[in-house]
Image: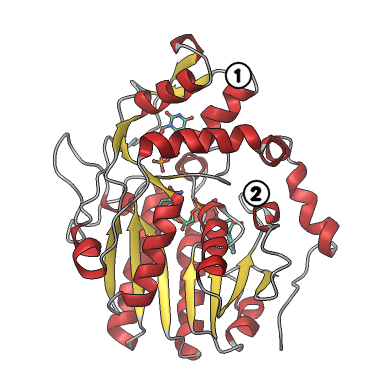
Amino acid sequence: MSKILVTGAAGFIGSNFVRYLLRERPDVRVIALDALTYAGNLESLSDCSCDPRFRFVRGDICDAGVVAPVFREHLDAVVNFAAESHVDRSIMGAQEFVRTNFVGVQVLLDLAREHAVGRFLQVSTDEVYGSLGPTGKFTENTPIAPSSPYSASKAAADLLVHAYRTTFGLPTLITRCSNNYGPFQFPEKLIPLFVTNLLAGQKVPLYGDGLNVRDWIHVQDHCEAILAVLDRGKPGGVYNIGGESELPNIEIARRILHYLGHDDSMIEYVKDRPGHDRRYAMDITRIGDDLGWQPRIDSQEGIIETIDWYVANENWWRRIKTGEYLTYYDKQYGPGGVVGVEE
Ligand code: NAD
Ligand code: TYD
């Protein structure tokens, strides 16, 4: 039986990963740790909570006093999803981004070292590479050149992970993935924001000329890639992950509008994001050749399926839009504090 700490487990990708891990690995025990910031939502893990192999701990990765008892439980691996993740919020204020995305990673790395954790996987992003022109793709050797405070904080963490590998021989792994979509994504990101706005009868705000390109991947494919890297990745390795599905934002907007029975009149062109990266595209040769992973979900079908999920799960996103979800934890466990640590 292996024991895996998943941090940031109540967020979008973390909650999908926990669910996938429990389904895929009958012999796994998962400790799901999350600070439950505005982006963390225990309702995204409600179907895991009765599984005896699952335990939730509320905690901030920057707080060694809270996280250390979890590391004393003899972990086999750590997968770190915990982060401030929204570029626009990082432009409004970078402090929380540097704190969680950099200092938090340092706290986890020190604990992983102290407790000789077998694998430490840092979930990073394609955004650390900066912006592409109309051609070419990011490889793992592309220089790090982040544009936003968010991507700079993620890049800083990648450098720290690399340093712990080089200096202390920590068995680290870094994955850099492109834009995810799928169920349980917080409705501030492009796809869930546009879908939920339209379902609520509101227009969709498209930045600039709408021609910025992202490489879209279904969160399920991302989770499968992370598990492949965790299982078989080379210690010290960096792995790009992408969906091989480049789409300009206007195309995503039109697919959503069309599927929900609207036309372009529901698009509101708004002022561009400062420092807005023009194009991301991932070269995924390494993970394909070394680990045999390929994305499986076609974005045409995956995006439609995701829209259907938001239509069917209005209760989940409405409670976010009203802020009601923030009280879920307190109702279940009482205000504040840490639960579920086995001393
Ligand atoms: P998210 O914002 O949905 O979830 C982040 C989670 O981290 C939340 O549950 C939040 O409560 C938790 N958290 C924040 N600060 C914390 C702290 N100090 N201590 C403990 N928990 C804390 O983000 P996401 O989209 O699920 O992204 C997860 C990871 O994947 C991030 O590291 C992000 O950089 C990376 N990533 C995301 C994408 C994407 O398209 N969403 C793409 C590539 C990489
Ligand atoms: P986002 O989901 O914030 O992801 P990221 O910035 O990490 O790629 O944005 C995806 C793209 O959509 C990006 O080019 C910015 C654009 N965008 C809009 O046009 N309008 C919006 O309201 C949002 C949130 C994003």
Please state the quadrant of the image where ligand 2 appears. top left
Residue sitting at 29 percent across and 61 percent down?
A: 293
Residue sitting at 41 percent across and 21 percent down?
A: 254
Estimate how packed mark 1 is, as few (under 14), some (14 to 19) or many (20 or more) residues with alpha carbons within 10 Å: some
Instruction: Locate residue 146 relative to residue 74 in the image: left or right.
Output: left
Instruction: Locate residue 297 relative to residue 36 in the image: left or right.
Output: left
Residue 74 picture quarter: bottom right
Examine the rendered structure and indicate whether residue 180 appears above or below residue 188. below
Image location of residue 330, percent across then percent down: 82, 58
CB of mark 1 within 8 Å of CB of mark 2?
Answer: no
Examine the rendered structure and indicate whether residue 199 appears above or below residue 244. above
Q: Mark 1: which secondary structure?
A: loop
- Which amino acid lies under the numbered mark 2 shown in the image of this protein? Tyr
Image location of residue 316, percent across then percent down: 69, 42
- Which amino acid lies under the numbered mark 1 shown in the image of this protein? Gln
- Quarter placement of the C terminus: bottom right
Q: Which residue is mark 1?
A: 202
C-alpha distance separating marks 1 and 2: 22 Å
Image location of residue 48, percent across then percent down: 66, 63
Q: How many marks?
A: 2
Judge: label 2 CB < 8 Å from ligand 1: yes
Instruction: Locate residue 300 relative to residue 335 in the image: left or right.
Output: left
The tag on residue 38 is: 2
Image location of residue 325, percent across then percent down: 74, 46
Residue sitting at 48 percent across and 67 percent down?
A: 80
